[in-house]
Image (cartoon, coloured by chain):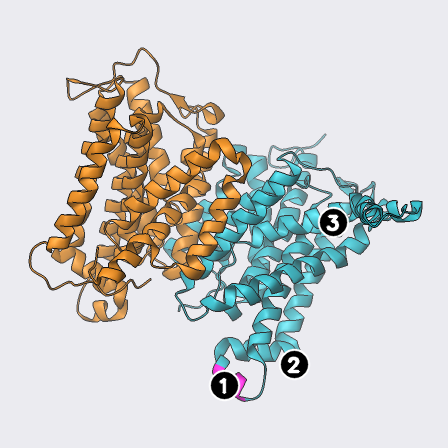
Chain colours: A cyan, B orange
Amino acid sequence: MFELLGVPPQALFGQLLLGLINGAFYAMLSLGLAVIFGMLNVVNFAHGALYMAGAFAAWLLLEKLGPGLGWLVTQIGATPPEWLTQFQIGYWGALLVAPFLVALLGIVIERTMLRWLYQLDHLYGLLLTFGLALVIQGLFRNEYGSSGQPYQIPEILQGTRNLGFMFLPNYRAWVVVASLAVCIGTWFVIERTRLGAYLRAATENPALVQAFGINVPRMLTLTYAGGVALAALAGVMAAPIYNVSPQMGGDLIIIVFAVVVIGGMGSILGSVITGFALGIVEGLTKVFFPEASNTVIFVIMAIVLLIKPAGLFGRTA
Amino acid sequence: MKADAQAIATVGTPWHHYAAFAVMAALLAAAPFHIYPVFLAKLLCFALFACAFNLLIGFVGLLSFGHAAFWGSAAYASAHAAAKWGLPPELCILFAVAVAAILGGVIGGLAIRRQGIYFAMITLAFAQMIFFFALQAKFTGGEDGLQIPNSYKSIALGTLNLRDNITLYWFVFGIFLIGFLFIYRVVHSPFGQVLKAIRENEPRAISLGYHVDRYKLVAFVLSAALAGMAGGTKVFVAGSAALTDVNWPMSGEVVLMALLGGMGTIFGPVMGAVVLITIEEFLAERAGAWVTVIQGGIFVLCVLAFRRGIVGEIARAIKKPL
């Protein structure tokens, strides 16, 4: 058994992979935060809660959808057929349905609450979404308790493959690849398509874009919906790795805030790179200096603030 | 975050501040004869905490989302000084203030390098770092927290036995008054006027030649130290320091107190703390798990429809800043 820098390679690569997975979630969440902040000037504190809602939606679609439909049918006096009570939406369906459901919730939030705050100080947006995060998290905790619910890895992605130097669980490889694809896709939509051009223009000068006949308020709504859908998608992907629990978003969002401060919210690729890089750094810290693994990102944030206060990819306002 | 313009040019203390202060002091002096004094003492600790927080958001326009770091680390410092060193309460609290002030200097020094929304995120992140530190460090007792042992002689200033509930209340009341009047003095000093100038228009304050960062840092350290005074005192009321004191929901709670009572008002945070802690105490037995949801709901309602807060609305109705 050879060692690498005094650490067995199994442990090293295992933690690196774990770091990469965490980094994938940091990247997807900070990406959504950056897109929402760019358009709406709102720091979406509810992002973590909506990520959790996405994971819960996946779990509910799998475990509770059939029985729930059956219960509805009994309420109108009929006996539900067995195929209905057995009905469930699995992982692949949830990847589409859960973000869609959370996006609908996002539309409601934006239409009924957030839009009244655009003319005010940005801090009110943070305070409102903080309150929403408390409400969402509290509701899920009341309904499903604090303990986590397990979520099965879909069948095709179960098992591991031997890479020679380590065993790679298929599902984790899928998460890294899929989240990279999602991040690049988002970048492509915003930087390379007509819709993205409208978005970027509206970020710079909403009044002028509106004068050209583009419905800016609707774009704001769709941006918020898209951003929280990204969070929900990350939640579905996280469900088989971590347990689905009401707290899963609360602590994560603070780390993502630190990631956003380090990267700066100015650039899309910047937040993706920062997310993955910090995940890896965190994983490495777990190998070499485990006590500091919780705090290393905050230490990096302090150093970045000292050297480059605007963030690694940020523009000074 | 611009509150209604305060009447700033008045010389001396306006009469309605005397009146409002007299009402508040009279109510607080009469309260322990009707309400459980330990609960009131806890209330006053939170009121001072909210006032300290409000010094930043209300008068400099800086939203700190990490004030639990100062409250919590001061609580640990105070409990440690009492349990391990056996210092008398007043020295424990002084030590706690010093710890919170130093921490405030470090975190504040870094956080003021960014403005607005980033400032909030940075303070939140550093507070979470302190939380992880408290979770892992040996002397904090981790999940168990730090208890003040029964053998500890809780005698403040040589004569006040804090094991007696009424005496404890008067002791905390005294500390609250010191903190409250100190904040009042700071806000209405020339230094406080510069802080308000920064809140209203930072570029203009810079162009007038003020070292804005220095003012912000001093305000931040003062706010942290006062939050520490509240947190250090709270240990003698609750008998322990725990992880909840340093976790992020505590930061959110103090924000909510200031928001509910009225950010940028002198008396608002006290009102906010009284109302919120009373609601929570009332709900704790009846609604249990729903407390978080209700807190969140109050947040949403305040932001959407009630941004001036209770005292802010009163001040608007009588057309006098409170």
Q: Which residue is mark 1?
A: A208
SS at mark 3? helix
Identified at 79% across, 41% down, the residue is A152
Instruction: Please state the extent of the stretch shown in magenta in the rendering.
Output: A207-211
Query: Can residue A289 be seen from the camera position used here?
Result: no
Query: Can residue B48 be seen from the camera position used here?
Result: yes
Q: Which residue is mark 2?
A: A194
Same chain for marks 2 and 3?
A: yes
- Sequence-wise, which precedes: disc 2 or disc 3? 3
- Sequence-wise, which precedes: disc 1 or disc 3? 3
x then y, percent, for residue A90: 82, 49
Q: Is residue A212 magenta?
A: no
Q: Are marks 2 and 3 in contact (CB under 8 Å)?
A: no
Q: Which residue is mark 3?
A: A58
**Based on the displayed image, in which of its 4 quarters is residue B105 positioned?**
top left
Same chain for marks 2 and 1?
A: yes
**Residues packed near mark 3 inside 10 Å, few (<14), some (14 to 19) or many (20 plus):** many
Q: How would you classify the magenta stretch by its main secondary structure?
A: helix
Identified at 65% across, 40% down, the residue is A143
SS at mark 1? helix
Q: Quadrant of the C terminus of chain B?
A: bottom left
